[in-house]
Amino acid sequence: MISLKRNSKKELTPATGLRSRASSFYTPNQPNLFKISRSKFNDFLTCQRCFYLDRVKGLVSPSIPGWTLNETTDLLLKKEFDLCREKQIPHRIFDQYDLNHIVPFMHTEIDKWRDSLHHGLKINFKNTNIILQGGVDDIWLDKTNNKLIVVEYKSQANNKAVNTESYLSNVYHQGYKIQMDFYAYLLTEMGFEVSPVSYFYVCNADRSTTRFDSKIVFMETLVPYKWDSTWIENKVWEMIKLLNSEIIPEGNNSCENCAYSLQRTNLTFMAKDQKGLSKKLFRNSSKWRTYKNRVNIRCHGICEYCNLRKMTSVHHRIESRLDSDYENPNIKDLMGVCEECHDLIHNNQSSSNNSLEFQAESPALSGDNGYSTLDEPPGHWIT
Ligand code: SF4
Ligand SMILES: [Zn+2]
Ligand SMILES: [Zn+2]
Ligand SMILES: [Zn+2]
């Protein structure tokens, strides 16, 4: 899908592709505390290049729409469990699994722990400046041993009934297990005793009903999972090493985001090339000669920048993003200039422009004079 950037008033705004607040990304070897959420840690495990470009270079991935239906099952389940929490009674599903010794865990911080956006479970990792955090769906209490049970609600719509073995071995659920390992690790590090078995509360929507009748029916299954957090610390150390490195790492060979970006970059340079060609064609047109003549008459053939030397070319004062603007300039935005002044103007423009598009100038497009092989001075390359 293609996403358009909107501000808080839902108005379209230019998309920069970069984070604007410096505190939202990491500077290698910075002393300040920096939060890494469970989902960013998962990004690190998935593709190091994507993780690095996001967390260190401040690149923003295109936004995707929310998971409204999944969030709704989470929200409604939360309401049910909160009622049981208040009364400290087992939830209706525990009966089916002979788990009536379990109640939802009561704690003053429970709402913060479940708020993945602003808080979550939180630890400072080993006296580093890294804070690990993650919002858990729920925590239950085993009353027989006072240990905490980590719980994740999951919604899906699969034709096959949920069974523990296939649920846990499904390749698309490996991230769920990582999620569970991570939360169990955080809770343990926060000083709680955590039960070795966690639960996925899986809600499977029934797709076989013959009608909609304004409802979707779910089959609920508790999938027990023995979490394992022994691998986590090594990976966090690796992640911290990467955050403090100045070198952009390789991506995952199967990363679709990396593949898309690479192909897109190649085509962006091709588009720049084409744009240069169309500008060159335009500057050989009779329409452009007419513009040049009008400017020449206005300035009496003398450079309008130094007012000394003979005018040799015409400069666009305003950089145009669109070909149509470039080819239909307002005469007052054109300036008759001499060669020296024209060079000067463009050199000033390119040195004052620090945007990525100039840093990203392809060596293949640059001639010895620093201009492109298409005789286009810098300052004109707009993607
Ligand atoms: S160099 Fe660019 S700005 Fe200057 S005249 Fe040519 S097209 Fe216009
Ligand atoms: Zn587009
Ligand atoms: Zn990637
Ligand atoms: Zn001049």
Image (cartoon, rainbow, N blue to C red):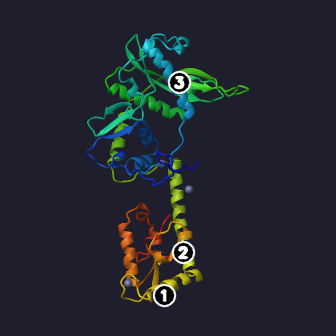
Residue at point 38%, 66% (across, down): 353
Q: Is residue 181 visible?
A: yes
Amino acid on which the number 3 mark rests in the picture = Leu
**Label of residue 297 in the image:** 1
Residue at point 57%, 73% (across, down): 278
- Mark 3, Cα crowd under 10 Å, few <14 / some 14-19 / many 20+, is few
Residue 198 x/y as whole percent: 46, 22
Marks 1 and 2, the one that precedes in the sequence: 2
Cα separation, mark 1 vs mark 2, equals: 23 Å
Residue marked by disc 3? 76
**Where, by quadrant of the figure, is residue 145 drawn?**
top left
**Where, by quadrant of the figure, is residue 156 drawn?**
top right
Cα separation, mark 1 vs mark 3, equals: 75 Å
Residue 312 x/y as whole percent: 45, 86
Q: Secondary structure at mark 1?
A: helix
| Pointer 1 residue Cβ closer than 8 Å to ligand 1 | no
Task: Residue at the far right: name it.
Answer: 210
Cα separation, mark 2 vs mark 3, equals: 59 Å
